[in-house]
Amino acid sequence: MGKTFKKGVIIVSAEITTLLTFFGGTGDLAKRKLYPSTYSLYKKGFLQNHFAIVGSSRQTLTDEEFRQLVLDSIAEEADNYEQAQDFVSHFYYVQTDVTDPKGYAKLLELNNKLDEHYQLKGNRIFYMSVAPRFFGTIARYLKSEGLITDNGEFNRLMIEKPFGSSYETAEKLQSELAEAFDDDQIYRIDHYLGKEMVQNIAPLRFGNPMLDAAWNKDYIENIQVTLSEVLGVEGRAGYYDTAGALRDMIQNHTMQIIGWLAMEKPTDFTDKAIRAAKNAAFNALKIYSPQEVAENFVRGQYGASADGSQIKYLDEPDVPADSQNNTYVAGKLQFDMDRWQGVPFYIRSGKRLAAKATRVDVVFKKGVNIFGVGGEKLVNPVLSILIDPVGKIEFTLNAKDTTSEFQTRPDTLTWEVSASDKAMTPSPYERMLHDCMNGDGSNFADWNGVSVAWKFVDAIQEAWDQKPATDFPNYVSGSMGPKAADELLAKDGNAWIFKG
Ligand code: NAD
């Protein structure tokens, strides 16, 4: 028997009964993340006897070859040979071309056999770990070829990113999926929602009445979300040059983190209530006109590093010489709702920045100085939630400088995830697989949130397309981005907390 790691409550886990089909079963994601995560669920007892895993892809493989591929993928986690062998004995392989209905007939036959053999009660999860152009096709064939059971406790679809490349394409995909699955059967993956410290936002906010009470315009000056990368485009220009930081990092991950920060207080901690509370905020997000985009958003493209060791974006392989792609975005979000009137949410994400970091900085209002000269160093209290690369919470508060007669100084309280906790922390993919098996959609992106994020991002992209940048490259590799991103905050009297 394993233990759940859900919502801080330790309870003995019930075994989950399911058939899990991985489309893209020989792909990079399956090998690096999905099989090790599934194995971890098996080791913790969530998967015991009543489960079967089907891998499917274009390659021709026997069950034995596929099992070896899975064994190789879990080699690092496997400390017990017999246990690993037992685990992979639940794996089966079907060669398919997902665009050809014939493959689905083979899948159906195998699924029905496995259903009986492992007594799977018709419970099915279909995981689409293939190129996004296949998502709609697979959903359609799952329905038309009869793979969705009508006797099961559940049939669920897990869908990888990206969910569309614009509102229009996302909406088309959504309507294709909706032909086969109800919305509560669709689990849209954003692996940032599976990260431990992103999941820590809710207990911090709602578990501490003083933070809960202060989480609004009366006490918060601004909120900052930073997703900065040190690496450049790393040979992925074919995809990245059409996406940019705006679509690759802002529309999905950044907006999903914003959802936890800006949401109303949910009536309870169920997925339905959480989504409703997030959507109260998403639906109040101001979508910008081209003029407002110019006022509230900054785009950037990296130049070479100061010492010449890093090349500029335009010199990267496969990047068109006249590329207008954004490798950096900073902007200000505004929510037209009582809680957040006048509170800017600043976001930024970019490549080739000074530091790799995913973090949230909640900047509280500064107190009135009643201390006279002794209070000249009063600062805005800041709650920082460090998500990557290390999980940390820092709370910078005003306190007395213990070395002086009476002088305040900012002191930082720090908590860091311990090495032993870290070793026990499930990976985002393990969490997401577990939550989907349990029918908990709390940590998946819902359609309303995704569609608002696309409308918001499309408005920015359209404004930029109409007015090409004339200053690219506008930041040096190894810096924290263009100067205009600092000016964006400075004109509100604010500054980025994280300086790289
Ligand atoms: P990949 O190219 O390594 O694997 C693709 C898989 O799809 C292979 O198993 C291939 O055989 C199969 N496939 C391709 N065409 C097919 C067809 N016509 N019929 C049946 N099978 C077919 O891709 P990946 O990196 O594993 O990514 C898979 C999905 O996961 C994508 O949506 C990607 O955006 C997403 N994703 C990947 C990562 C990652 O780290 N690799 C991270 C986040 C999201």
Image: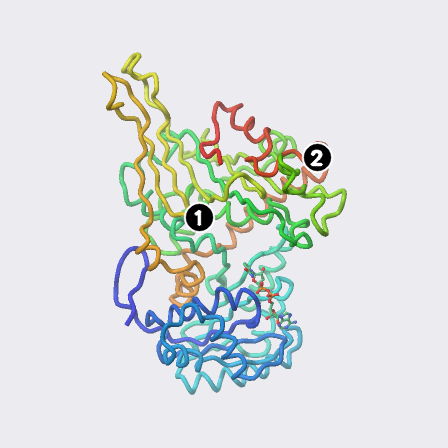
| Relative image position of residue 36 (x, y in whole percent) | 44, 68
**Mark 1 is on which residue type?**
Pro
| Circle nearer the viewer, 1 or 2 | 1
| Relative image position of residue 417 (x, y in whole percent) | 33, 49
Query: Helix, strand, or loop for circle 1?
Result: loop
- The front one of 323 and 271 is 323
Residue 389 - label: 1
Is the distance from the Cβ of mark 1 to the nearest ligand 1 atom less than 8 Å?
A: no
Residue 456 in view (yes/no): no
**Label 1: few (<14), some or many (≥20) within 10 Å?**
few
332 w.r.t. 37: above or below: above
Residue 372 - label: none
Q: How many marks?
A: 2
257 w.r.t. 3: above or below: above
Report, in whole angstroms, how far the alpha carbon at label 1 lies from the one at label 2: 32 Å
| Relative image position of residue 142 (x, y in whole percent) | 57, 74
**Mark 2 is on which residue type?**
Ala
Answer with the quarter of the image where residue 416 lies: top left
Answer with the quarter of the image where residue 458 lies: top right
Image quarter where ligand 1 lies: bottom right
Q: Is residue 110 left or right of residue 427?
A: right
**Label 2: few (<14), some or many (≥20) within 10 Å?**
some
Please give the residue where the numbered disc 2 appears in the rendered image.
469
Question: What residue appears at the point 38 percent right and 34 percent down from the top-left corner?
Answer: 216
Question: What residue appears at the point 54 percent right and 64 percent down from the top-left corner?
Answer: 29
| Extreme residue toward the right, this view | 321
| Extreme residue toward the top, this view | 373
Q: Earlier in the sequence, mark 1 or mark 2?
A: 1
339 w.r.t. 487: above or below: below
